[in-house]
Amino acid sequence: MRQSPNAYPFDPVREIPNAWVADEAKYGYNWSLSPDGTTLVFAQKLGSPKVPTLRFFTIADGSQRMILVPGWTGIGSLDWAADGKSVWMFTYTATDEFALLNANVQGKIRTMFEEKSMTLGWAIPSPDGQHLAFWKASGNANVWMLENF
């Protein structure tokens, strides 16, 4: 059977095929696989002082690129754009300011939306790339009480 040019072998019973994947697993939930399955992106903090950083890994050869995201305390979530050419991410500061950023794979970062009072998270693009759904929460609830009902 001929293997697709975009397919990469993976045997979860025996081992992970590339040692760098196992090493990067320590960064927990904050990673995302590109729509074409060729690239992983991880969020972590590097340097001194710690700067949020995107690490792009090419699965086929293990090569990587890093993109710094200065001016923010951390990256809350990562989601690839539908076309696989950029990543949507929510960032935050120590003073509870949040923003939706878009970083293309060449390193250009754009602020798309800022929020000073509500938490933001999980930007999920529609398959056609024309819409973006994201989570926004204030921590408040709307509760009504009816008496003598």
Image (cartoon, helix red, strand yellow):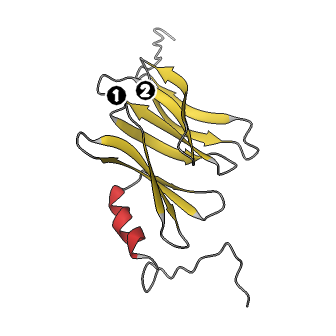
Secondary structure beneath dot 2 equals strand
Marks 2 and 1 close (CB-CB < 8 Å): yes
* Mark sitting on residue 98: 2
Kind of residue indicated by mark 2: Phe
The residue at 30%/22% (across/down) is 95
Where residue 30 appears, as percent x and y from the top left, is 42, 50
Query: Around disc 1, counting alpha carbons within 10 Å, would you say few (fewer than 14), some (14 to 19), or many (20 or more)?
Result: some
Q: How many marks?
A: 2
Residue wearing tag 1: 93
Which quarter of the rendered picture does the N terminus lie within? bottom right
Where residue 60 appears, as percent x and y from the top left, is 56, 73
Foreground residue among 139 and 39: 39
The residue at 29%/27% (across/down) is 94
Q: Residue furthest left?
A: 48
Locate residue 149 relative to residue 128 in the image: left or right. Answer: left
Query: Around disc 2, counting alpha carbons within 10 Å, would you say few (fewer than 14), some (14 to 19), or many (20 or more)?
Result: many
Locate residue 111 relative to residue 2 in the image: left or right. Answer: left
> Does label 2 or label 1 sit earlier along the sequence?
1
The residue at 67%/72% (across/down) is 6
* Mark sitting on residue 117: none
Foreground residue among 26 and 73: 73
Where residue 35 appears, as percent x and y from the top left, is 64, 57
Q: Residue furthest bottom?
A: 1
Secondary structure beneath dot 1 equals loop
The residue at 65%/75% (across/down) is 7
Kind of residue indicated by mark 1: Thr
Where residue 58 appears, as percent x and y from the top left, is 53, 65
Q: How far apart in space, not on screen, are marks 2 and 1 (Cα)? A: 7 Å
Task: Classify 42 as above or below 68.
Answer: below
Task: Classify 51 as above or below 142.
Answer: below
Task: Classify 64 as above or below 83.
Answer: below
